[in-house]
Amino acid sequence: MNIPYRTRRRLNMIGTVALALFLVFIIVWFCWVIWIERYVVYTDDKATLDLNISANDIIGEVAVPPEAGGTGITIYYNEGANAIETSNELKALDGYFIDSDDLTNSLEGLWNKLKPLASGTPIMIDMKGGYGSFYYTSHLEDAILSQSVEVSKVDDLVSDMNAKGFYTIARISAFRDYNYGLNHVSNGLYMLSKAGLWADESGYYWLDPTNLSVQNWISSIINELKAMGFKEVVLTDFRFPTSEKYIFKGDKTAALVECAQKLAENTASDGFTLSFCVNDASFTLPEGRTRMYLENVDASSVGAKAAQASVEDTQVRLVFVAETNDTRYSDYSVLRPISVAEVMEAQKAEAAARQELSNTGNNDASAATAPEATAPTGAVG
């Protein structure tokens, strides 16, 4: 079929215009996608579009997902119904703690303060802080060692403490963990704008207690410390941050209780104790060998706090982390700064001497007032 010349020219013109419009559409669409990308928020479940995000919401260092090729998540299983061992009775604590500031000073001087203490003395030592840095040589894949602490010397210090026979307690930050949050964005608490992870006033990220990867991460640290010889591990920062600027849907208290139970199941073994440093003394601890730790409690409020505690046998399972040698803490388990150890041990020795002297005096008085024995009276003849 022959198409007239004018018709062919008209069709060519229409085709050229259509092609030009198509190219313009492609260019505009491409530019729009590039522009709109900043408003796309990715979560574990889906990707959503939030045009209310402001560029001012994205401040500081932006957390990025880890590189592909990791080893995946370690899954822990409770080894039977009796995996949480309760047969070994817990004892009251009366000892000292070593914080991260102590670890930045001379560790040789620190050991000199520890050496005079008796075997069995409870000693708590910081092993991982809120920044997420490890103060010991961890072999976990995601562990980042501290640059401000000589971790190899901390390893030696822990070894010496175990050899001395101290009751060693490791303290680690649970949900306040900048390093892990930075490398595992989906495991943290998001800003309300969903632009990235929420950070506290110190710039630290907080982890989601309901996240399985978070629970397994903390369990891995606890089990590694247990393998190093620690008799007890205390999880500090075991709470939600006090802010309304992050996203969490659900009952926060129930989430913490459930997470605590899961961690206890993941790490339970004969003779090992898992403890939780909490803000609320009414917090429900998991069953088994567990304790509650309370910090920043004034000595005048010790009795009131103990009355609020949900634990039974508060003299043993309620531990006050005190900053002074005030004796009002001594009705309960207590850990004090290692800096007051010399004074406290001298006070204990003096009190023991007075008690022994008092006991000796009482025994002498009892002997002096005892009735004399009399001979039996014979029959009168």
Image (cartoon, grey):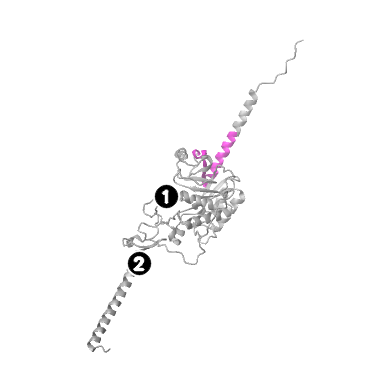
Position of 53 compared to 267: left or right? left
The amino acid marked with disc number 1 is Lys
Instruction: Please name the residue that numbered disc 2 is placed on.
Output: 37
Q: Quadrant of the N terminus?
A: bottom left
- Image quadrant holding the C terminus, namely top right
Q: Percent position (x, y) of residue 309?
A: 47, 41
Magenta residues span 327-355
Name the residue type under label 2.
Answer: Glu
User: Which residue, given by chain and number where applicable, does mark 1 sit on?
Assistant: 252
| C-alpha gap between disc 2 and disc 1 | 33 Å
Q: Is residue 350 left or right of residue 53?
A: right
Q: Is residue 231 above or below residue 28?
A: above
Q: Which of the two residues, 117 or 378, is positioned nearer the viewer here?
A: 378
> Which one is nearer the viewer's eye here, 50 or 174?
50
Residue 334 lies in magenta, yes or no? yes
Alpha-carbon neighbours of circle 1 within 10 Å: few (<14), some, or many (≥20)? some
Q: Position of residue 301 (x, y in %)?
A: 44, 39
When asked about the image quadrant of residue 44, the answer is: bottom left
The secondary element bearing badge 1 is classed as: helix
- The reply, left or right, for residue 59 in relation to residue 231 is left
**How far across and how far down the image is residue 303, in percent?**
47, 38
